[in-house]
Amino acid sequence: MGVTMALPFLDAMTPAFAAAGRIGATDAPRRIAFVYVPNGIIMKDWTPAVEGTAFEFPRILKPLESYRKDLMVLSGLTHNTGRALGDGPGDHARAAASFLTGIHPKKTAGADISLGVSVDQIAAQKIGSATRFASLELGCEDGRLVGNCDSGYSCAYSNSISWRTSTTPLPPEVNPRAVFERLFSDASETPEVRAKRLAYNKSILDFVSDDTQRLKGDLGKTDRRKLDEYLDAVREIERRIEMAEHDSKQFTPTIDKPEGVPVEFADHVRLMFDLMTLASRPT
């Protein structure tokens, strides 16, 4: 069995990366994230009442107040291409489709879907080489990509905000276990081997423990601390995924849920955000 585990950016990596011309001595991978809330935002609790930098943080943005100097709040933005433009009903599909593309979707429920390349994929082409995956599409609600989901618009428009080409939507992964395995398991690991490892409740970290200890011996104090913090974060997410899988087996939902999805929606959201943060480390 083989396991591949990427590392956080350590000071000890700088000479090697610089020599290879991949990451400079002071550069770190640039990261960008787009978050879409399909049912909208309570704008009065989102938008600051005044312009400038001395505004009072409204209720929804209050947790970001300590980062005031590091953020900008933009409002008054809209995509005219998300409007009907003569196509009749279908606001939900058009909103999701135009969010990152700026394109008015072709109204069809068939295979002849047509939209445009989304900005996240344009960014991935430019800056995605510094992370293991150029882009990662995550979601918290499963949905199909075929059929009619909104007044004659294909489900592909409603259920994917990321588009590699004008006809190729990138469906989001909603199962935390699947995301974790993609990030940290060796691609050569067969389903049978993976099932055996999970059955024995072995952490991925257990399979790299010897290598980890050897690496620590070659690192300075700061790098050892970074590595320990990173591995602790991975272990914690593994534990939470295992707990979510256990909870799912004890819960009888009215609809089918993928294995590993937490019962509580808020827990699911937090877990996916944490996985997204771990995924943004350098290769």
Image (spheres, rainbow, N blue to C red):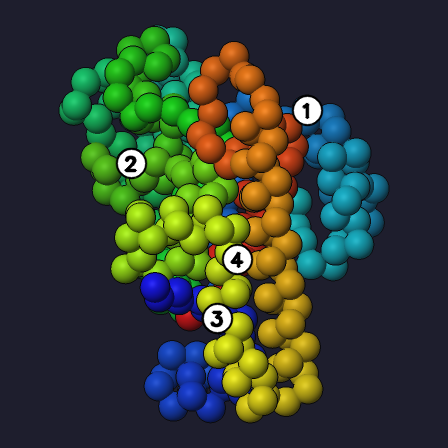
Q: Is residue 262 above or below residue 251?
A: below
Query: Which residue is drawn at the image coordinates 42% and 44% (left, top)?
Result: 178
Q: Is residue 50 above or below residue 189?
A: above
Q: Identify which amino acid the numbered label 1 is placed on.
A: Ile
Residue 187 is labelled as none
Label 3 or label 1, whichever comes before in sequence order: 1
| Residue 17 occupies quadrant | bottom left
- In this figure, which residue is indicated by the disc labeled 2? 169
Position of 245 compared to 47: left or right? Answer: left
Whole-angstrom CA distance, mark 1 to mark 4, is 41 Å
- In this figure, which residue is indicated by the disc labeled 3? 208
Q: Quick one: SS at disc 3? A: helix
Whole-angstrom CA distance, mark 3 to mark 2, is 35 Å
Whole-angstrom CA distance, mark 3 to mark 1, is 46 Å
Q: Identify which amino acid the numbered label 3 is placed on.
A: Val
Residue 42 is labelled as 1
Q: How crowded is the residue under tag 3: few (<14 C-alpha within 10 Å), some, or many (20+)? A: some
Q: Identify which amino acid the numbered label 4 is placed on.
A: Ser
